């Protein structure tokens, strides 16, 4: 049996291996970035409920997570703006409420609401009880 003996220099093999390893690393890193992009896109497009949580019921999941985040930030900004305005206008608001409460129409409405609530509660024994004490 004849044998063939081929000798390849170590430098040639080393160069080929380094080239293949670099190509594999480059491909892995580029595909990893693609995977990360896909994961982020999927997370932002995930359907959630109005609170930004994933519901057990698909019918509740009407919004994308990104929409939910934007809605929450807009609500927070609006709430903050209204609070700032209310604090800056506190005296005017207080005076206006006091003026409204002092009108006869408002006083009558408050009395009627109290009497109606008391009357309704008194008509149902489980909602109303009276203790007379000395």
Image (cartoon, rainbow, N blue to C red):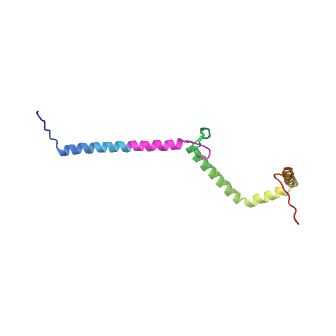
Q: Residue at x 88, y 62 (%)?
A: 132
The number of discs equals 0
Q: Picture quarter containing residue 49? A: top right
Q: Where is 13 relative to 100, above or below?
A: above
Q: Picture quarter containing residue 110? A: bottom right
- Residue 92, given in percent of the width and then of the height, sits at 76, 59
Is residue 43 found inside the magenta-colored segment of the image? yes
- Residue 108, given in percent of the width and then of the height, sits at 88, 53
Q: Residue at x 30, y 45 (%)?
A: 22
Residue lying at the far top in this picture: please name it: 1
**Which of the pair 123/96 is nearer the observer?**
123
The majority secondary structure of the magenta stretch comes to: helix
Residue 91 lies left or right of residue 28; in this view the side is: right
Q: Quadrant of the C terminus?
A: bottom right
Q: Quadrant of the N terminus?
A: top left
Residue lying at the far bottom in this picture: please name it: 134
Q: Picture quarter containing residue 15? A: top left
Is residue 100 found inside the magenta-colored segment of the image? no
Q: Residue at x 44, y 44 (%)?
A: 36
- Residue 123, given in percent of the width and then of the height, sits at 86, 50
Residue 30 lies left or right of residue 114; in this view the side is: left
Q: Where is 108 relative to 8, above or below?
A: below
- Residue 27, given in percent of the width and then of the height, sits at 35, 42
**Which of the pair 5/26 is nearer the observer?**
5
Magenta residue span: 30-52
Q: Residue at x 26, y 45 (%)?
A: 18
Q: Where is 113 relative to 58, above or below?
A: below
């Amino acid at each position: 049996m004849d044998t063939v003996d081929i000798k390849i220099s170590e430098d040639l093999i080393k160069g080929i291996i380094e080239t293949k390893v670099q190509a594999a690393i480059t491909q892995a890193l580029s595909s990893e970035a693609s995977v990360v992009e896909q994961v982020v896109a999927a997370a932002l497009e995930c359907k959630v409920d109005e609170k930004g949580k994933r519901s057990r019921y698909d019918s509740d999941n009407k919004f994308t997570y990104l929409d939910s985040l934007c809605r929450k930030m807009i609500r927070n900004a609006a709430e903050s703006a209204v609070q700032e305005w209310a604090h800056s206008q506190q005296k005017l608001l207080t005076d206006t409420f006091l003026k409204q409460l002092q009108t006869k129409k408002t006083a009558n409405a408050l009395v009627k609401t109290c009497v109606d609530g008391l009357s309704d509660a008194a008509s149902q024994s489980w909602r109303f009880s009276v203790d007379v004490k000395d």
